[in-house]
Image (spheres, coloured by chain):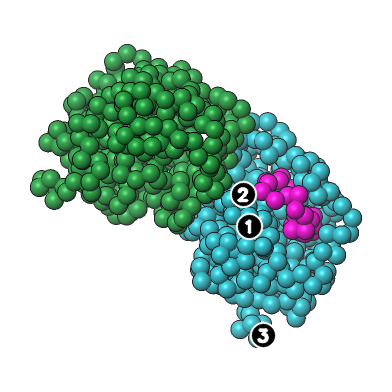
Chain colours: A green, B cyan
């Protein structure tokens, strides 16, 4: 695929749910630059990744609507004139999902029905790209993991994300609301939440390195993961949104080279010139939902739309550290208040 | 396994959710005969399979508590002293799930969390056997279908049942609430709902044969299914409830010989000495969620607990027709009012 998928977005009416969050805001940046008509939707749930600073510099080139995807009449209105919906709103903490499974169910499962029902009734020609997760696979039988691997989630979050993903495929197959799911592995980069450590370890490790703190590695650090730089993740959404070859399908969106936790931390400390590693025992509540080593085979998605990850880990971490060094307070303090245009 | 699994239930405190329904009430009958302390729970949702006539003759040997599995404080109380819970409450209509996905979600997905959270907090030593469904597989890649087949449901009901099943495995693995899931194929036999045609075709076909009506077969009738007689299904639950070899696992519980729709109808008409077949085009709303041919490989369950289906289709249909001929009005009229003991 050539640049055609980028040109596709010129003047295109798109919506991003969870648009003030990490991946959503980076995607919004690309879409604004491509000349799309961008509507961001976000509910500003405390402790989520929503942050008005994430749209600093592009806020005048898009619209923000604060609302909750769980609210059906809201969704019925907001989906109406959109051509592509990037459906990224989600509760992403595995630990929180185990402590409060009902809220995770509401956000990651039931709300997907609200969105899809709204599309079916009010805008059946829309295209929906869902942010899935590698968490649905659970502990892999073999590596790398392809889309033919069983879905066998190990936590509430993975179960609800799997159901939300299945709804998308169903509405594609049964109601012709075109939809697909991108099963993202560990995404990292600028604009990720680093205020607390309940949304995956990579953002938290980056914060600890920035603050020259000790980075705790669970167990012996031999577990392997793959990491996707957020610009590559945003590019995956752009390609999927512009393609009808992906409809009704799920795709792994994995990183460049798999790397062990211990090597990851070495690279991070080296890039940051700060932080130090310490090996500690697994906390029981984390161990019991841990999935061991994981990395994805993304060749199905590459074949479908030509995507591949282009930013190597070291380069991505370098850009990430630079970004947070320049804007750290916006990510450590309480979320910035809404600018007056949307207050 | 010998009779030990039957002796296990003497004096055993068990609960059946959906206990006034088809499979639940047949299972209750076995448990009452085995001398178990049986608590049936049912919410009497209209158009569900709940029917007080289903416990005719055993009502004085068990307790009935009318309540809804979605109600958390109710569940917190009811699970307290139970040793085994047979978790059969569910919305079983595929068509209804597509018309009202939220209710299906509440019953088949969210309520499973209520039950499991109640067990985790109030009775973590309980054993839970969940009534899963072959519907989670969707359209099979190959036959017979084993438990290694991808979960790829084609309707809302299948998605929510898959999530409900996954919760059970999760609570087993993470919280040590012992649980397993039996993925039942098409179950038939006495005490099934036959008042309407939205709960699978087998009960409806039986009613049409009983009333000497025309039985409509969609398409060319070449689709294959396997059928489990309800006594065999009840035996599967008894074996799973008494075994710790099944914890954290899913098992297919399939029927005897696979048979095409057209041959099934021939056998049924022959057994009933009534009814007639007619081939018609697929209704679009059914075709779009149809899964083609399906039959299950149940060898994993046989190896784990020694179960196998023992009632051949013709014998099972014969018993079924006899049962409904003797009690037809109890299944065609509105549900019988509650006996005074539970009113």
Q: Nearer the viewer, mark 2 or mark 3?
A: 2
- Which chain does the numbered disc 2 sit on? B
The numbered mark, 2 or 3, whose residue comes first in the sequence reads 2
Mark 1: which secondary structure? loop
- State which tag comes first along the sequence, 3 or 1: 1
Does B251 lie within the magenta span?
A: yes
SS for tag 2? helix
Horizontal side of B230 relative to A21 (left or right) equals right
Left or right of B237 in this view: A176: left
On the question of residue A49 being in view, the answer is: yes
Q: Is residue B34 left or right of residue A327?
A: right
**Residue range (magenta):** B229-253
Determine the chain carrying the residue at label 1: B
**Tag on residue B341?**
3
Mark in front: 3 vs 1: 1
Q: Indicate the position of residue A54 as horizontal and vertical percent values.
A: 22, 37
**Front-most of residues A184 and A261:** A261
What residue is shown with label 1?
B177
Q: Residue at x 67, y 62 (%)?
A: B125
């Amino acid at each position: 695929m050539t640049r055609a998928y980028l040109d596709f977005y010129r003047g295109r009416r798109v919506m991003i749910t969870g648009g003030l969050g990490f991946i959503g805001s980076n995607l919004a940046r690309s879409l604004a630059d491509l000349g799309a008509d961008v509507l961001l939707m976000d509910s500003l749930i405390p402790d989520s990744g929503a942050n008005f600073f994430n749209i600093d510099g592009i806020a005048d080139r898009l619209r923000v609507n604060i609302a909750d995807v769980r609210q059906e009449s809201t969704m019925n209105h907001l989906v109406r004139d959109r051509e592509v919906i990037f459906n990224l709103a989600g509760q992403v903490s595995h630990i929180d999902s185990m402590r409060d499974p009902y809220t995770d169910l509401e956000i990651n499962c039931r709300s997907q029905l609200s969105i899809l029902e709204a599309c079916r009734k009010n805008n059946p020609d829309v295209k929906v790209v869902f942010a899935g997760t590698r968490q649905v696979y659970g502990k892999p039988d073999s590596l790398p993991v392809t889309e033919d691997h069983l879905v066998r989630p190990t936590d509430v979050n993975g179960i609800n994300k799997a159901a939300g993903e299945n709804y998308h495929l169903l509405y594609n197959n049964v109601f012709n609301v075109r939809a697909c799911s991108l099963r993202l592995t560990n995404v990292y980069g600028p604009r990720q939440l680093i205020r607390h450590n309940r949304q995956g370890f990579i953002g938290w490790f980056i914060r600890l390195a920035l603050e020259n703190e000790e980075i705790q590695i669970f167990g012996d650090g031999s577990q392997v993961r793959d990491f996707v730089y957020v610009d590559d993740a945003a590019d995956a959404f752009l390609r999927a949104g512009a393609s009808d070859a992906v409809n009704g399908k799920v795709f792994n969106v994995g990183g460049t080279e798999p790397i062990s936790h211990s090597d990851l931390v070495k690279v991070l400390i080296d890039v940051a010139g700060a932080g130090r590693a310490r090996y500690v025992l697994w906390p029981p509540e984390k161990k019991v939902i841990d999935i061991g080593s994981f990395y994805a085979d993304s060749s199905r998605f590459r074949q479908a739309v030509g995507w591949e990850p282009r930013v190597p880990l070291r380069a991505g971490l370098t850009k990430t550290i630079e970004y947070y060094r320049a804007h750290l307070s916006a990510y450590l303090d309480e979320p910035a208040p809404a600018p007056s245009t949307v207050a």
